[in-house]
Image (spheres, rainbow, N blue to C red):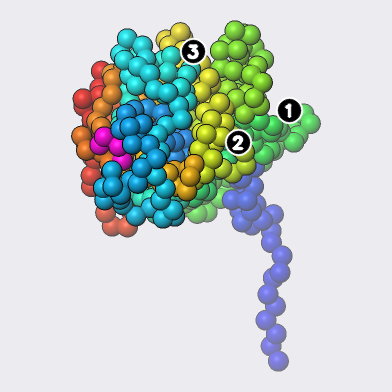
Amino acid sequence: MNVQHTRSWLSRRELLQQAGSGFGAMAASALLGSLSRTVAGEDSGSARAPHFPAKATSVIFLFMEGAVSQVDSFDYKPMLEKHHGENPRNTIGKLEKTQFESIGTVLKSPWTFRQRGQSGLWISDLFPQIASQADELCVINSMTSKFPEHTSANYFLHSGLGLQGRPSMGAWVGYGLGSDNENLPGFVVLNGGQIPSGGLDCFGSGFLPASYQGSLLNANGTPLANITPGEKTSVQQEVKRRLSDRLNRLGLDASGGNDALEGAIANAELAARMQVAVPELLDISGESAATKTLYGLDAEFPHTQTYARQCLIARRMVERGVRFVELTIPMVDGYARWDAHGGLVKNHGDNARAVDQPIAGLLVDLKQRGLLDSTLVVWAGEFGRTPFAQGSDGRDHNEYGFSVWLAGGGIRPGMAYGATDEWGYRAVDQPLEMHDLHATILHLLGLDHTRLTYRFGGRDIRLTDVSGNVVREILA
């Protein structure tokens, strides 16, 4: 009988070649050097020229997850006061189906609206500090969504599609413009405690290379796993770097230039550089006492301190060239978000108390430092809320008309755009869709939304799908 013996061991070279992609994930691979970071034909690390001169170079997205009530914040409707407590079917008329179908009476705002600043924008006492910056804001009161449920609406706001798996707008911005800082990601999510409905896919890169996905940093505590090098000395780090560099090269050569492997190496190298850059970035001890007070870092309410830290770090990020910074909200009263199906006064009151002073401080600080002109600040939730009660003291979801605002970065300040009806229920004057908002954000960054495409599944796909118009009336 002839017996065929199969070799069960690997030579040293074969071991190195086959293990290359695994070692390539070592976060220390580029602490003292780097490889080429070309991913799918695009250099994900280098800055790229916009399509045309840009007004803004960075975006800070203040995501108010759970949906702030427009009729309690930026959309003043005296008719709610006049008809408070009445049957909305008799006063408002035909009502759209709500998520919970617990329709109460017409509900006036518990907060007083006032005209603010020289612009005279109507803003309620829910946001007294933001109101002090009214002349910097462009309030859009005619935003709409296609989805009344948090997860789908969150995907729609972030990616232009109400389904999981599409690239987030931060990923699109990185794809279009690259990075201005090779030591930090182009798209960063500062987590204050609440990952939104829909999870991390709200910040994903979808079919774009993985190097464009949002990097999640915790605002408090340890910002990121393994952010502190595990090696005790720089010599040990150098040894690992050299080994990793060799293994990466072997793996790339053996793969023939595999895009996924190149992406993994790029992310590992960026992670290594972040071990140097992130601790310095998050160290706010050198900020002045006046700056910390401006943001609310010395506030009594702990959630104000959390969001103040997020806003201050966001400013430090745009100073260092991060393209897109998104802030989630703190964990106020558990996982309640702004989702005030009941207890409107406590829910909105506590959440506003957490974010109001930090956001106002951010606007003031950006302006004082000459950064507001080049930084686009976007404040938005996924939809609005009904002008009538859910039960006795809540408001249900309302995708038919709500408010968002923008500031800086080429936006006309001190103006309101569009309008809902006299109840604050449906957008009736210059209604906008998410695609319009996305097209405008990209335009301010110097990107033509119709030209920013990626070939996937046999067609060119873009953030704005086949829709979207730049809202030129709000541009400075």
Which amino acid does the dot numbered 3 rest on?
Asp
Q: Which mark is residue 365?
A: 3
Rounded to the nearest angstrom, the CA distance separating label 3 from label 2 is 25 Å
Residue that badge 1 annotates: 234
* Place of residue 349 in the rendered image (x, y in percent of width and height, measured from the top left): 53, 30
Q: Which mark is residue 142?
A: none
Report the quarter where the N terminus lies: bottom right
For the record, the magenta segment spans: 421-425
Residue in view at x 39 percent, y 40 percent? 85
Q: Residues within 10 Å of mark 1 (few under 14, many from 20)?
A: few
Q: Give the image quarter of residue 420.
A: top left
Q: Are marks 3 and 2 in contact (CB under 8 Å)?
A: no
Up-down: is 282 above or below 11? Answer: above
Residue in view at x 54 percent, y 40 percent? 343
Which amino acid does the dot numbered 2 rest on?
Val
Image position of 113 (left or right of 21): left
Image position of 66 (left or right of 239): left
Q: Are marks 3 and 1 in contact (CB under 8 Å)?
A: no
Q: Nearer the viewer, residue 457 or 382?
A: 382
- Residue 360: within the magenta? no
* Place of residue 28 in the rendered image (x, y in percent of width and height, measured from the top left): 65, 36
Badge 1 element = helix
